Image (cartoon, grey):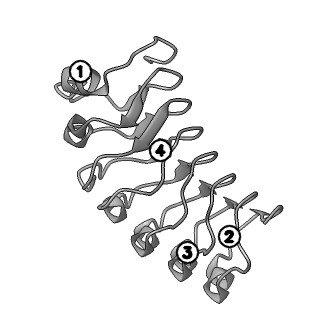
Amino acid sequence: NLSRNNLQNSGEIFAALKCLGGLRNLDLSSNFFFGPISDHMKDMSFLESLCLDGNQISLLPTPLDSLTSLKKLSAANNQLIMLPDGCGAWTQLEDVNLRKNMISTIPPEIGNWTKLKRLWLSHNKIKIAPPEMGNFTALEELDFTSNLLTSIPDEMSKCTGLLKLHLGQN
């Protein structure tokens, strides 16, 4: 847990931590990371949980297809404008929290996140929910509150495990 430490240089942090192959959970929330996050993040394929909440991150490195063990990703309350190339390789994801960012589009490759149980995308600028979200048959909670949606795809009817659906303020 490296949260709330006034850290500023993500390059130094990820370069130092990438040799810790036993590290599974990394919390870098509430620091002072600004702009694009370091490319050294790609070298942490062993991570299962990554929390980057409450920074000023605008971009995750691309491609990020090396993070294949990732089960939980939280990058809420940042300035992300998009998901990175290669995010379709995150096939183990169960929880994704990208609330309060500036994301406007969701790439179709998220259809590979078939183990996803919780997806929080509220307070972004998303206009269209991709039909590939119909692949989320394990999905239990979906939050699209406070976006720009005008409809949801018919394919969402395949999300038969859905227990909570938040679509208000669109």
Label 3 crowd (10 A; few <14 / some 14-19 / many >=20)? many
Residue in the picture at 54% in, 50% down: 95
Label drawn at residue 161: 2
The image quarter in which residue 24 lies: top left
Can you say whether 129 is above or below 82 in the image? below
Label drawn at residue 133: 3
At label 3, the amino acid type is: Met
Of the residues tagged 3 and 1, which is closer to the observer?
1
Helix, strand or loop at disc 1?
A: helix
Left or right, residue 143 beside residue 42 = right
Residue in the picture at 23% in, 43% down: 42
Residue in the picture at 63% in, 47% down: 99
Label 2 crowd (10 A; few <14 / some 14-19 / many >=20)? few
> Could you tell me if the residues under marks 4 and 2 are in contact, i.e. CB atoms within 8 Å?
no
Label drawn at residue 12: 1
The image quarter in which residue 1 lies: top left
Q: CA distance from mark 4 to mark 2?
A: 21 Å
Q: CA distance from mark 4 to mark 1?
A: 21 Å
| Most foreground residue, 132 or 24 | 132
Residue at the limit of the structure toward the left, as seen here: 19
Helix, strand or loop at disc 2?
A: loop
At label 1, the amino acid type is: Glu
> Could you tell me if the residues under marks 1 and 2 are in contact, i.e. CB atoms within 8 Å?
no
User: Of marks 4 and 3, which one's residue comes earlier in the chain?
Assistant: 4
User: Of marks 4 and 1, which one's residue comes earlier in the chain?
Assistant: 1
| Quadrant placement of the C terminus | bottom right
User: Of marks 3 and 2, which one's residue comes earlier in the chain?
Assistant: 3
User: Of marks 3 and 1, which one's residue comes earlier in the chain?
Assistant: 1
The image quarter in which residue 111 lies: bottom left
Label drawn at residue 73: 4
